[in-house]
Amino acid sequence: MNTPYGRLGLKDREEISRGMYASESFAEIARRLHRPTSTISEEVWRSTTYSWCYSAEKAQARSDELKKKGRKKKLDTNPALKEYVHEKLRREWSPEEIARRIRKEYPQDTTMRISHETIYQHLYCLPRGELKKELMHGLRQERKARQPRAYAHYRRQRIQDIISISERPKEVEKRIVPGHWEGDLIVGKNHQSAMGTLVERTTRLTLLVPLKAKDAFAVRTAFARSFTQIPKKFKKTLTYDRGMEMAEHKLFTKETKISVYFADPYSPWQRGTNENTNGLIRQYFPKGTDFNEVTIEAIKKAEDRLNTRPRKALGFHTPLEKFYELITGQKVVLIT
């Protein structure tokens, strides 16, 4: 008899056959073989003939044949599921985002189910080539923790009339009330270019801001222009680090009516939403990107990808769906 919980062998199947002939229950057979009851029931239903007769020899022959052929991979037997997974991988979604989101989009279709482990296995089993390279391009890689930016510069120059994060309304921390934003710059190749990032804390809606320069005037005007597309009631506060590009914060507040609060030095976790989003943005614009050479169309495409990508923190809804719910007051219903 095989070791318990190993594969069923011919002797095991003969015991099952004898038990079935003696009208024993699946549980009784399972106890004798030291197996889970489910193993016995699945074996019997899988190998019973149309005449409702379980044959140990036929069951073993079937098992041997399947072992020779190898079990077909789930994605190879379901073209629709495979197409869905590949399409989302091309949009830089993670396997977990795909596995959880598909349940929302196909709640009644049990054939459209897959685990993130199966997706990873599928990717790593693909032969080398352009398809594998394309599909794995969006997977986030392990990377060193991001270093706080430009605080040495902060020691030399200080922004005037800052309002500390300690004075920020308490409602901001709870993420219940929308309209509170976090901002940052992603600096490009050789620190010669940059792109602005603005993230709404409740919905994770992200605005990517093209910049002609990194100085305070360029950042203020570009950020203010980006906020014109956001309804007034969703523009309350902006939390920023102490980079000198926000030196014109008072003018920014006057123009936009958005209050600016500054995080403490060396405290990137006080803008955790923005920091995490920057990690996603780096999938589209890796370190070393020269933003002077990136088109506005490319930036807007990445912004669209980010806002239509399901987030774990949002129950695998997308930022755009959650923002739409806020604007309309209606729940988003996924139709398949």
Image: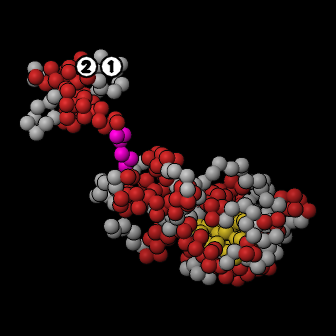
Mark 2 or 1, nearer chain start: 1
Residue 287 in the figure: left or right of residue 75? right
Q: Does the magenta stretch include residue 207?
A: no
Residue 2 seen in render: yes
Query: Which residue is identified by label 2?
Result: 11
- Magenta residue span: 69-74
Residue 284 in the figure: left or right of residue 88? right
Q: Residue 335: horizontal and vertical position, in percent?
A: 33, 68
286 lies above or below 18: below
Q: In which quarter of the image is residue 103?
A: bottom left
Q: Residue 18: horizontal and vertical position, in percent?
A: 15, 20
In this view, the residue in front, 240 or 75, is 75
Q: Does the magenta stretch include residue 73?
A: yes
303 lies above or below 90: below
Secondary structure beneath disc 2?
A: helix
The amino acid beneath tag 2 is Lys
The answer to whether mark 2 and mark 1 are in CB contact below 8 A is yes
